[in-house]
Amino acid sequence: MKKSAPAALRNREPIREVLAQQLPETGTVLTIAEGSGEHVVHFARSFPALTWQPSDVDAEALASIAEWREETALPNLASPVQLDVTAAQWPIAHADVITCINMIHIAPWEATLGLFAGAARTLPSGALLYLYGPYRFDGAFTAPSNEAFDASLRARDSRWGVRDVSDLQTAATGFVLRAVVEMPANNHSLVFRRN
C-alpha cells in the first residue's frame, strides 16, 4: 500500500538543492532506508540522467516504494530491493552515490556502523555518502525541539537517539566529512566522501 510521509514532502526540495551541488552527472544512486518512496521519486524526476536504486529493510516500505514507482513510471527508477545495512553483504555490490535520509536516529548504533561499512564496500574512491537528519554537535543539541525529540526517541527504544556528528566521523572509517549544511527544521545535511 502506497504511503505518504508529511516530512518527506516538506524536506525533499531542500535536500534536492543540496544534492544538486554534490551529485555526479551520471551513475547509480542507492537510497538507504527509503521509507515511503516519495524522496526517491522526487529525486529521480529531478535528476533523470542518474539511475535511482531505492532500498529499505521493511516490507511495507518496499511495497509503498513499488507502488510509487508503478504510478510514476520513471525510466530511471529501479525496483526497490530489501537491504539490511547491518548485513555483511548487500544486494547491491556497486553504487556511485549513497543517500540515507532520516535513518540514523531511529535505528540502533549498529545500523550506523553497518551503513558506513557497507558504503565503504559499495562506493568507489571520491564517491558521495549523503546523510540527512537531526544531529548533535560536540554534545550539544541545535535546538530545544531536537533535545525533546531525542528524549522521545530514547523513550520508544533506548538504542535510538539523535547522534553526535563527532561520533559519526569516528565511525565513518574510509570517509571524510567534507561539508555540513544547515537545513530547515533543525536538521543538517552531512556530505561524506569516500577516501
Image: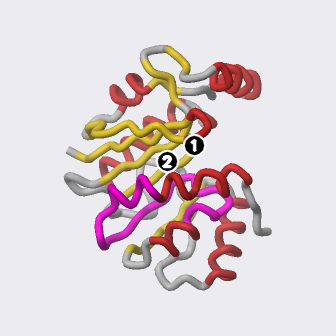
Q: Position of residue 150 (x, y in %)?
A: 65, 24
| 178 relative position to 9: left or right | left
The quarter of the rendered structure image containing the C terminus is top left
Label 2 neighbour load within 10 Å: few <14, some 14-19, many 20+:
many
**What residue span does the magenta drawing correspond to?**
17-40
The residue sitting at the top extreme is 139
Q: Position of residue 37 (x, y in %)?
A: 63, 64
Q: Position of residue 133 (x, y in %)?
A: 54, 39
Which element is circle 2 on?
A: loop
What distance separates the C-alpha of mark 2 from that of mark 1?
11 Å
Pointer 1 residue: 103
Which image quadrant for residue 66? bottom right
Amino acid residing under circle 2: Val
Amino acid residing under circle 1: Met
Which image quadrant for residue 51? bottom left
| 3 relative position to 20: left or right | right
Name above or below for residue 104 compared with residue 71: above
Which image quadrant for residue 20? bottom left
- Residue 125 is inside the magenta segment: no
Name above or below for residue 164 compared with residue 87: above
Residue 31, numbered label = none
Of 29 and 94, the residue lying toward us: 29
Upstream in sequence: badge 2 or badge 1: 2
Of 67 and 39, the residue lying toward us: 39
Q: Are the two marked residues, 2 and 1, in contact with CB atoms closer than 8 angstroms? A: yes
- The residue shown at (68%, 25%) is 145
- The residue shown at (41%, 23%) is 167
Pointer 2 residue: 85
The quarter of the rendered structure image containing the N terminus is bottom right
Name above or below for residue 136 compared with residue 60: above
Name above or below for residue 100 compared with residue 76: above
